[in-house]
Image (cartoon, rainbow, N blue to C red):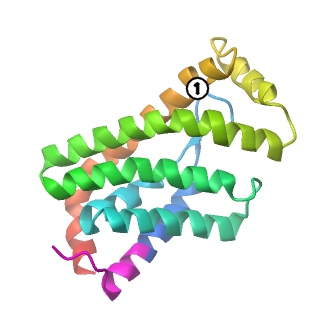
Amino acid sequence: MKTKLGTREIVTIGMLGAIAVVLMLFEIPLPFAPPFYEIDFSEVPVLVGCFALGPVAGILIEFVKILLNLVINGTATAGVGELANFCIGCSFCIPAGIIYKRKKTKKGAMIGLISGTLIMTFLGCFINAYIMLPTYAKAFKIPIEGLIEMGTKVNASITDLFTFVMFAVVPFNLLKGVLVSIIVILIYKKISPIIKRH
């Protein structure tokens, strides 16, 4: 099976990465999480490209998305937040892409997306608790307890770092994974021939 990316694939990766950056601008706040947790659908073009062109392409689209967003919007975390977002995005698309590559059916896609959602949720707990939250606290010069208090204001069950992860991070990633997966399932077969012909 061909793994080398040709000119068409590289152009497609760039286009999907650019679309992902645009989708990052449209964020939806959630009632159960602090205001800095907002859902966007930038993983949709990443997963579409991952299914159409393979897991390596998915990683590259994720990289292009993060890089373009970094160039356009800059960073408040010296790139640490962006690196964490890249890792979380890859933890979603890589398992999904690998499973779909082995079983290119609707069932294979669904198993891949479910697996990716669960892995992203699991990894997201650790990355948020030990990388992103401390980094944001340092960047915005507020203690982690301040971030936890922001969570408490919207969800009384959030009282410490553990409950923050359980009641904000976990449902956030699960909801994002489910919504993105539904969209990918609905649109992939309709647009994949266009991507593969591009």
| Residue nearer the viewer, 123 or 195 | 123
Spot occupied by residue 78 in the image (x, y as percentages of width and height): 75, 58
Query: Of all residues shown, which one is farthest toward the bottom?
Result: 7
The residue lying toward the viewer, choosing from 178 and 101, is 101
* Quadrant location, the N terminus: bottom left
Q: Residue furthest right?
A: 141
Q: Is residue 74 above or below residue 167?
A: below
State the quadrant of the C terminus.
Answer: bottom left
Q: Is residue 5 magenta?
A: yes
Q: Which residues are magenta?
A: 1-13
Residue tagged 1: 165
The x and y percentages for residue 81 are 66, 51
Q: Point out residue 98 in the picture as x, y percentages from the top left corner.
A: 25, 55
Within 10 angstroms of label 1, few (less than 14), some, or many (20 or more) residues?
Answer: some
Inspect this view and state whether residue 191 appears.
Answer: no
Can residue 73 be seen here? yes
Name the residue at 35% across, 68% down: 57
At 25% across and 48% down in the image, what residue appears? Answer: 185
Displayed quadrant of residue 74: bottom right
Q: Amino acid at mark 1?
A: Val
Q: Position of residue 101 (x, y in %)?
A: 19, 58
- Residue 46, quarter of the rendered image: bottom left
Total of numbered circles in the picture? Answer: 1
